[in-house]
Structure formats: C-alpha cells, structure tokens
Image: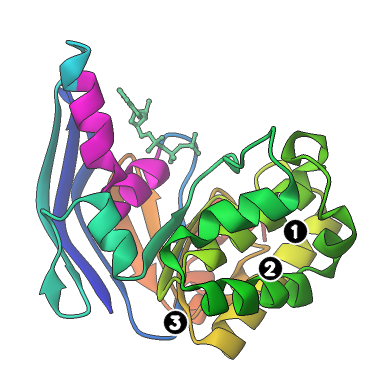
Amino acid sequence: MLEATGLMVFYENMLALNNVNIRCEENQIVGVFGANSAGKSTLMYTLSGIMEDIKKKEEMAGGERITVVGHIHYKGEDISNLKPSRRAGKGLILCPERRRIFKESSVLENLKIGGYLATPSQARETMDYVFTVFPALMKLKKRVGGFLSGGEQQMLAIGRALMAQPQLLLLDEPLLGLSPLMQAILIRGTKVIRDEKKISILVTEQYARPVLPIVDYAFILENGTAVMEGTRQELLNNPDVRAAYFGV
Ligand code: ATP
C-alpha cells in the first residue's frame, strides 16, 4: 500500500531522516516507535507531503533550506513529487501531532471542515460513523474544540481525519499526554476503524506499550534511522527494544 525507500530529510545541514525504508501493507496497522526528536513527525510530514509546504514556507521566509530525498510509492504509484492535496485526494491522510483541531470551531464544524474531500452522502455517513466509534463526541457536538479535554480533542482529530475519507491514515503520536484510560479508548477506536473500514494505519508513538497490542508490524526509529523492524513478537524478543520502548 505504502512503501518509502531511502528517505532522507535535511533541515539545513541537520540530518533528520537518514535513509529510512518503511512499508505499510493494505489493512495493516504499522507502528513507528522512537524517542523525542527521533524523526517521527518529520517522517509523517514527508509521507503526507506537508513537508513540501513547510519547505516552501521556509524558502519564502528566507529561512533554513530543507532537502527531501528518496521515493514514496503509494498504491503502486510514485507520489514523491505530488502535492499534499493530491496525496490527500488519493486517500493518504495525516492526523498530525498535538491534535491540530480548530479550537474556535465546534466539534460539528471541525468534522464538516474535515469532510471537504467527501461527497455530501459520504460526509453524512462518516459523521455518523465517527460518533459510533467515539460516542463521547456525540454529546459534545456543539462545544468548541478548545474546551474539549486532550482525549476528546484527539478523538475529534481522528474523526476529522476520517471525514477526509482516508485509505491510509497517518496518525502522529495520538496518545501523547493522555491518561491510560483515554489511551485505551483511542487504541480501541483505532483498531475498530481498521477492522470495520479496512483503513490501513501508520501510527507513531514514543512508547510502544499501549499501541503494541494492535500493531501488525513496527519500526524503531533512532536519531532519524530505522534501526530495527519486525512483528510485535520479533521486537518483544529483543531485550534492548523491550527495555527502551516497551517498558517491560
Ligand atoms: P517528538 O516526539 O518530540 O515530536 P519526533 O520524533 O517527531 O519528536 P521530529 O519532530 O521529526 O522528531 O524532529 C527530528 C529532528 O529534526 C529533531 O532533532 C528536531 O529538532 C529537528 N527538526 C524538526 N523540525 C525542524 C525544523 N523545522 N528545523 C530544524 N530542525 C527541525
């Protein structure tokens, strides 16, 4: 479904991704685990194409030079040079880190905005579906995003991404700063979305443990390099990985 090969991203002279190869097959949940600054968000921005926008903004502001090298194949097509909007139109949708919802807009408005790529009937159906996966959002429909708890904001961020009709959802650190209970709700929702809607999911996290039960395959990112990959069991069998990322 998605295969990135030889990805390198430089922020000026700083190498943020170093020859990263990553795959996500159809209907899989794939984890990318790494500490702070390992390059998780850089990877997600590069895959979704947002990095092209960041790069242009930097150039226009006369700021640092960002260089992206490598290839991204999605559903058999080389999308490395496609604009983020074209990638989104093909179902490659990013749910960015720190839940960038519209804080002044209501839950309903946030979801509607997310549905800009959907037909009216898709938008209606998906909105109903979001409330089925995250029933807590239902009674918060009219509340503005900024007044939601962190967990509710994350549900909304995922809901908004679903409204864009993803076939591959890029979930960047969805659990960051949330309570174990909220993490469990979000993890369950993520699995339900894959199982019921057959949406493939690439999810990054700092700590693997809460996500581990639902991933089919995972990569470990260290200082911009994918140092290890494997099935859940393969990674669990590695004592260093267990200690550093699984807390077991
Ligand atoms: P976190 O868990 O803290 O979000 P991350 O794994 O998502 O970390 P990135 O945000 O991708 O890591 O950052 C990778 C490296 O690139 C870091 O050293 C970071 O400081 C650097 N970096 C990220 N964005 C920029 C930028 N716009 N300009 C310069 N350096 C950057």
Q: How many marks do you count on the picture?
A: 3
The residue where tag 3 is placed is 28
Query: Is 223 drawn above or below residue 152 in the view shown?
Result: above
* Three-letter amino acid code of the residue under disc 3: Gln
Ligand 1 located in image quadrant: top left
* Three-letter amino acid code of the residue under disc 1: Gln
Nearest the viewer among 22 and 66 is 66
Label 1 and label 2: CA atoms lie apart by: 6 Å
Instruction: Please tell me whether mark 2 sits on a helix, a strand or a loop.
Output: helix
Image: magenta residue range: 38-58
Label 3 and label 2: CA atoms lie apart by: 14 Å
Q: Is residue 39 magenta?
A: yes
User: What numbered label is drawn on residue 183?
Assistant: 1
Query: Is 178 drawn above or below residue 15 in the view shown?
Result: below
The residue where tag 2 is placed is 187
Quarter assignment of residue 14: top left
Local packing at callout 1 (Cα closer than 10 Å; few below 14, some 14-19, many 20+) is some
Residue drawn at 53 percent across, 43 percent down: 97
**Quadrant assignment for the N terminus:** bottom left
Expressed as whole percent of the image width and height from the top left, the position of residue 96 reads 49, 47
Query: Horizontally, is 239 left or right of 248 in the view?
Result: left
Nearest the viewer among 139 and 75 is 139
Expressed as whole percent of the image width and height from the top left, the position of residue 28 reads 44, 82
Q: Earlier along the polypeptide chain: callout 3 or callout 1? A: 3
Q: Give the color scheme: rainbow, by chain, secondary structure or one colour.
A: rainbow
Which residue is situated farthest in the top direction here?
A: 62
Expressed as whole percent of the image width and height from the top left, the position of residue 182 reads 81, 57
Local packing at callout 2 (Cα closer than 10 Å; few below 14, some 14-19, many 20+) is some
- Classified by dominant secondary structure, the portion drawn in magenta counts as helix
Query: Horizontally, is 49 left or right of 81 in the view?
Result: right
Evaluate if marks 1 and 2 touch, with contact meaning CB atoms under 8 Å apart.
Answer: yes
